[in-house]
Image (cartoon, rainbow, N blue to C red):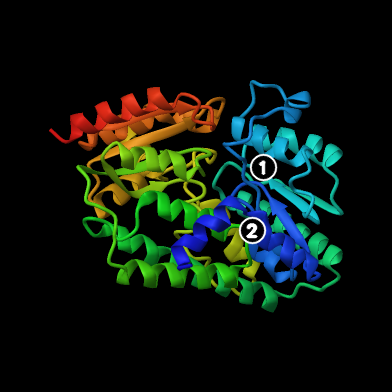
């Protein structure tokens, strides 16, 4: 089995490696959202495991505890938890990403028992005082998980962990560079599969997986076909390769993204600082472009264009760097942060000459026929 084929198997059975490692005595710490500092979990000698939902599993048991007017991604994650599918986790950590994750934390820890649990209050505003606040939150988390793991987490251990993750991010960017070619050497659905698989294993194994995928993508003879348009996908809660595959089936090459599982948390390195918590606080507060953060250009007086550039300029930069002809904005139902931003995103990109298609989904692609019709019509428009 080649590397890319093994990735598919890992995606289909994400918990397999984590269960093996737990059997070997490793502590597995599940976390919600990319805003969680994996570097600290790794420095404690534990394995970070990103909790994702299951688009193929109907929500049943979880709806006994959560309202249906709640983020379907969060509901799906909770549902597989109460069904016992996360019974290999030794700990559960959640950051204050949004009100849905904040609200589910107490319900989760009460109904899905683990030996360790912790909530990290991540500020929503970028300001020096917020940096200091987050640094204190990370210091508290470091002490708590160190106590749980039975180790003293030194600054040196955190710095070494940061270097491991920075190496991983460098490989991640190398993988994305392969998508600048026309046609791309890796399809969009393949990339999402690699990311989903990698988020369920230790960082050193993920880096080895990336190296193998990069080597195979550059040497294989059967590569992705050149499609009619190069598109970017952005939005919330999208970890399902099937949606990206649907876009590619409709006749496009998905070559770049602005997604939580994609570029948002993995595009920028953590700065090496004397106190490594400073570098982590800067990374997870300032280098993580997301609708849940209130960003400002810092220019007085601030114009609307200044504001839009500060919030969404990275999206336009990606579109130019990867030669994108259109952008598909994917939003989950009840995801307030991204839905509030969608009108401004559309205005900003269209003013820059980029066509935009906004779609709302329930995470399970239950309206796949409707999605296909919308995507095909959008691609036909931008290919004229």
Q: Which mark is residue 66?
A: none
Crowd band around label 2 with a 10 angstrom C-alpha radius: few (<14), some (14–19), many (20+):
many
Residue at image mark 2: 37
Residue in the image at 68% along x and 67% along y: 42
Residue 318 lies, in percent from the top left, at 32, 51
Residue 19 lies, in percent from the top left, at 73, 60
Residue in the image at 70% along x and 58% along y: 138
As drawn, 15 above or below 39: above
As drawn, 160 above or below 381: below
Q: CA distance from mark 2 to mark 1?
A: 12 Å
Left or right relative to 300: residue 161: right
Q: Nearer the viewer, residue 80 or 160?
A: 80
Which residue is most to the front? Answer: 1
The mark nearer the N terminus, 2 or 1, is 2
Residue at image mark 1: 96
Image quadrant where residue 62 sits: top right
Left or right relative to 362: residue 148: right
Which residue is most to the left? Answer: 384
């Amino acid at each position: 089995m080649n590397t890319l084929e093994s990735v598919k198997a890992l995606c289909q059975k994400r918990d397999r490696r984590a269960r093996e490692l737990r059997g070997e005595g490793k502590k597995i710490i599940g976390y919600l959202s990319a805003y969680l500092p994996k570097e600290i979990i790794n420095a404690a000698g534990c394995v970070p495991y990103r909790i994702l939902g299951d688009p193929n599993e109907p929500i049943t048991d979880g709806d006994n505890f959560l309202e249906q007017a709640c983020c379907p991604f969060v509901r799906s994650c909770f549902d597989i938890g109460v069904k016992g599918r996360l019974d290999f986790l030794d700990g559960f950590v959640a950051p204050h990403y949004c009100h849905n994750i904040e609200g589910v934390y107490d319900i989760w820890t009460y109904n899905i028992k683990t030996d360790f649990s912790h909530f990290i209050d991540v500020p929503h505003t970028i300001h020096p005082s917020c940096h200091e606040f987050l640094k204190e939150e990370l210091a508290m988390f470091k002490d708590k998980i160190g106590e749980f793991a039975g180790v003293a987490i030194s600054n040196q251990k955190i710095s070494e962990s940061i270097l491991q993750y920075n190496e991983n991010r460098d490989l991640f960017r190398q993988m994305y560079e392969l998508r600048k070619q026309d046609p791309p050497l890796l399809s969009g659905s393949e990339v999402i599969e690699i990311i989903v698989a990698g988020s369920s294993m230790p960082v050193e194994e993920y880096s080895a997986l990336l190296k193998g995928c990069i080597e195979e993508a550059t040497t294989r003879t059967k590569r992705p076909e050149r499609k009619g348009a190069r598109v970017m996908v952005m939005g919330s809660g999208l970890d399902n390769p099937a949606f990206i595959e649907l876009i590619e089936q409709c006749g496009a090459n998905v070559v770049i993204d602005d997604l939580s599982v994609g570029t948002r948390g993995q595009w920028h390195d953590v700065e090496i600082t004397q106190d490594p918590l400073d570098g982590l606080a800067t990374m997870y507060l300032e280098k993580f472009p997301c609708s849940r953060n209130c960003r400002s250009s810092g220019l007085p007086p601030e114009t609307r264009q200044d504001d839009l550039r500060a919030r969404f300029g990275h999206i336009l930069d990606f579109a130019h760097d990867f030669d994108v002809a259109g952008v598909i904005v994917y939003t989950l139902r009840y995801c307030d942060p991204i839905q509030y931003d969608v009108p401004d995103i559309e205005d900003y990109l269209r003013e820059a000459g980029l066509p935009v298609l906004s779609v709302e989904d329930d995470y399970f692609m239950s309206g796949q026929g409707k999605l296909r019709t919308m995507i095909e019509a959008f691609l036909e428009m931008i290919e004229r």
